[in-house]
Image (cartoon, rainbow, N blue to C red):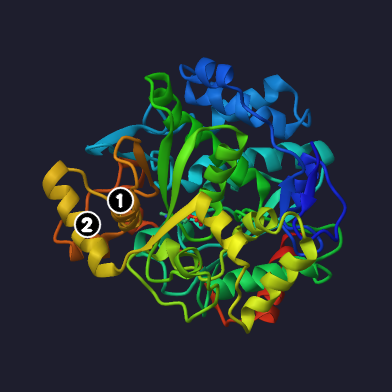
C-alpha cells in the first residue's frame, strides 16, 4: 500500500516512510492510496475477537508487509498490555440507546494512548532497523504530549520536543508531561495557544535545515498517519457486537479538536462498517460546526474553555476529509486550506450537501458542559470528563434515529480536569495509583516566546548538548 499527499506535490511513499516523515514535504498529509474493504462475512467473524486480535487484522493491510506479522502482532499486544481494563475499550450504557466508549484506560488516561503506545513502538522499530535518530517535534492541546512521552520515552533513537500552550492546559495534563524523566525529553511551554504551537510545528517541518546534520523531524501529532490508523480499530470494536446482535448500523459522536479521531471513524465507515451518523461535538471553538451547519469555514479568535484538549481552531485532519470532498483536486484543496488565514471559505451547494451526508455537528458551551456532567452523574451515577460531556450533549441534540445505538467516545478520565468537575459541583475523582504522587514529582519545562526562531534555537542547543 502506498501513501499519497493531500496536496499532490510530493511522491507517494511506503508505510514506513509515511510514519517516519509525518508531514509530507509539500506540507500535505499522507492518506492511503486505496482503502481496504471489509465484507459482511468479515464483520461477522470479527465480532468475537479480542481488542488486540481485531487491531491486528485491521492494521495489517495498512502496514502492507513493512513489518513481519509476528512482530506486528507483538507490538500491538505490548501497546495495550498496560491498559487498566482487560476489554481495553469498555462500553458503558448511559440511557436509552446511548452509550459511552471508555477510551481512557491507558497510562495517561486519554484516548491518545491508543495510537501513541503503538506509534512509539513503530518509530523505534523502523529507526533501530535503519540505525537512524530522529527529533520528534509535537504540539499538544494537553493530552498528546503526555501520551507521546509515555509511548516514546524508552526509545534511544528519539529525542522528544513537545510544545504545549503556556497556562492553557490543565494542571494534571501539564504535570503528566513535565514530570517525565529522561535526557531525551524536552517540554516547551509556548507563550501562545494551540494553533500557534501547531503553526510553528508545520513551519519547522517545511524547512528542516536548522537541524544538526543527520537529524530529521518526526511527528507524533495526528498528522502522522499511524495515529489515524490505530484509532480506526475501536470504531469496529465498539460497533461489531451491536451488529452481531442484529443492529443494522450504529452511530458515533466524537468530541473533536484536530479532527483526527472522527476522521478515523469516517474511514471505518468507508471501509464498510455500517455507520449511520457521525456527530462532530465541539466546544465554543466551533469552526467545524459552523462549516457543517452553515457552509462557512473561517477562523475566529481561539478562546480557552473547560475542555482544553478541544481548544483548536484550525483542524489539521480536516484536510484529509477535504481531499475526498474535492474528489482529489489537490490544487483546489491547497487554495482552500491556505486561504483560510484571511477569508471565509465556502464549498459548492452539492459539496456541502455531501459533507452533511457524512457529518452532523453541535457546539456545546462551558455552562452546558457543566450542566451535562451534573445531569448525567445524577441520573446514571457516571462522571463524565468535560470533553466527553460535550459529546454526550451533542449526541442528544443530533440523534436522528432512536433505534440506532449512539456511542459517544469517552476521550478522557475526569480526574484530569478538576476545574470543570468542581464547577459542575463534584469533588475531583482520585488519580489512579500509578499517578497518585503526581503532585509531588519534580517538574521540568522551559517557557519560550511564541516564535519559530526561539523554538529552533532551543532544539539546536538541546541536540548539540547530547553529542
Ligand atoms: C485530543 C482530544 C480530543 C480531540 O481529538 P482530535 O483527534 O484532536 O479531534 C478530544 N478530547 C480529548 C480528551 C482529547 O485529548
Residue at 39 percent across and 26 percent down: it is 247
Report if the CB atoms under discs 2 and 1 are less than 8 Å apart. Answer: yes
Tell me the quadrant of the picture where the N terminus can be found. top right
SS under mark 1: helix
Residue 7 on image: x %, y % = 78, 61
Q: Which mark is residue 372?
A: 2
Residue at 68 percent across and 71 percent down: it is 336
Residue 272, above or below 341: above
Q: Residues within 10 Å of mark 1 (few under 14, many from 20)?
A: many
Residue 418, above or below 188: above
Residue at 82 percent across and 65 percent down: it is 212
Within the image, what quadrant is residue 151 found in?
top right
Q: CA distance from mark 2 to mark 1?
A: 8 Å
Tell me the quadrant of the picture where the C terminus can be found. bottom right
Q: Which residue is tagged 1?
A: 392
Residue 103 on image: x %, y % = 41, 41
Q: Position of 386 compared to 424: left or right? A: right
Q: Say if residue 224 shows up in the picture.
A: yes
Residue 24 on image: x %, y % = 78, 57
Q: Position of 106 compared to 347: left or right? A: left
**102 and 232: which is toward the camera:** 232
Amino acid at each position: 500500500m502506498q501513501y499519497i499527499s493531500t496536496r499532490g506535490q510530493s511522491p507517494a511513499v511506503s508505510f514506513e516512510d509515511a510514519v517516519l516523515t509525518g508531514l509530507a514535504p509539500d506540507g500535505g498529509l499522507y492518506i492511503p492510496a486505496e482503502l481496504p474493504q471489509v465484507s459482511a462475512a468479515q464483520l461477522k467473524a470479527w465480532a468475537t475477537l479480542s481488542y488486540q486480535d481485531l487491531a491486528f487484522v485491521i492494521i495489517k493491510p495498512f502496514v502492507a508487509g513493512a513489518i513481519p506479522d509476528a512482530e506486528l502482532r507483538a507490538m500491538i499486544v505490548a501497546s495495550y498490555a498496560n491498559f487498566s481494563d482487560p476489554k481495553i475499550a469498555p462500553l458503558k450504557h448511559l440511557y436509552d440507546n446511548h452509550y459511552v466508549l471508555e477510551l481512557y484506560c491507558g497510562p495517561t488516561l486519554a484516548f491518545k494512548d491508543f495510537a501513541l503506545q503503538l506509534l512509539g513502538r513503530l518509530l523505534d522499530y523502523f529507526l533501530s532497523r535503519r540505525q537512524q535518530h530522529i527529533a520528534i517535534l509535537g504540539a499538544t492541546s494537553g493530552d498528546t504530549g503526555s501520551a507521546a512521552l509515555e509511548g516514546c520515552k524508552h526509545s534511544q533513537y528519539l529525542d522528544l520536543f513537545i510544545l504545549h500552550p503556556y497556562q492553557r492546559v490543565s494542571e494534571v495534563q501539564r504535570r503528566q508531561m513535565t514530570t517525565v524523566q529522561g535526557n531525551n525529553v524536552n517540554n516547551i511551554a509556548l507563550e501562545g495557544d494551540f494553533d500557534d504551537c501547531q503553526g510553528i510545528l508545520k513551519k519547522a517541518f517545511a524547512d528542516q535545515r536548522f537541524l544538526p546534520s543527520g537529524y530529521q523531524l518526526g511527528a507524533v501529532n495526528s498528522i502522522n498517519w499511524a495515529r489515524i490508523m490505530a484509532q480506526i480499530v475501536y470504531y469496529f470494536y465498539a460497533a461489531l457486537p451491536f451488529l452481531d446482535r442484529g443492529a443494522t448500523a450504529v452511530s458515533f459522536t466524537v468530541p473533536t479538536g484536530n479532527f483526527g479521531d472522527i476522521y478515523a471513524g469516517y474511514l471505518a465507515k468507508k471501509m464498510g462498517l455500517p455507520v449511520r451518523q457521525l456527530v462532530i461535538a465541539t466546544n465554543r471553538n466551533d469552526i467545524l460546526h459552523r462549516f457543517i451547519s452553515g457552509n462557512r469555514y473561517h477562523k475566529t479568535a481561539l478562546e480557552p474553555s473547560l475542555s482544553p484538549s478541544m481548544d483548536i481552531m484550525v483542524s489539521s485532519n480536516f484536510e484529509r476529509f477535504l481531499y475526498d470532498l474535492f474528489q482529489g483536486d489537490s490544487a483546489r484543496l491547497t487554495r482552500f486550506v491556505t486561504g483560510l488565514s484571511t477569508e471565509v471559505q465556502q464549498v459548492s451547494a452539492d459539496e456541502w450537501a455531501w459533507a452533511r451526508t457524512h457529518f452532523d455537528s453541535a457546539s456545546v458551551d462551558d455552562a452546558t458542559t457543566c450542566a451535562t456532567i451534573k445531569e448525567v452523574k445524577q441520573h446514571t451515577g457516571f462522571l463524565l470528563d468535560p470533553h466527553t460531556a460535550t459529546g454526550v450533549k451533542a449526541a442528544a441534540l443530533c440523534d436522528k434515529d432512536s433505534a440506532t445505538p449512539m456511542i459517544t467516545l469517552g476521550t478522557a478520565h475526569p480526574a484530569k480536569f478538576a476545574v470543570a468537575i468542581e464547577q459542575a459541583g463534584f469533588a475531583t475523582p482520585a488519580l489512579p495509583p500509578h499517578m497518585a504522587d503526581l503532585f509531588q514529582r519534580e517538574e521540568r519545562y522551559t517557557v519560550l516566546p511564541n516564535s519559530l526562531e526561539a523554538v529552533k534555537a532551543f532544539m539546536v542547543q538541546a541536540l548539540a548538548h547530547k553529542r
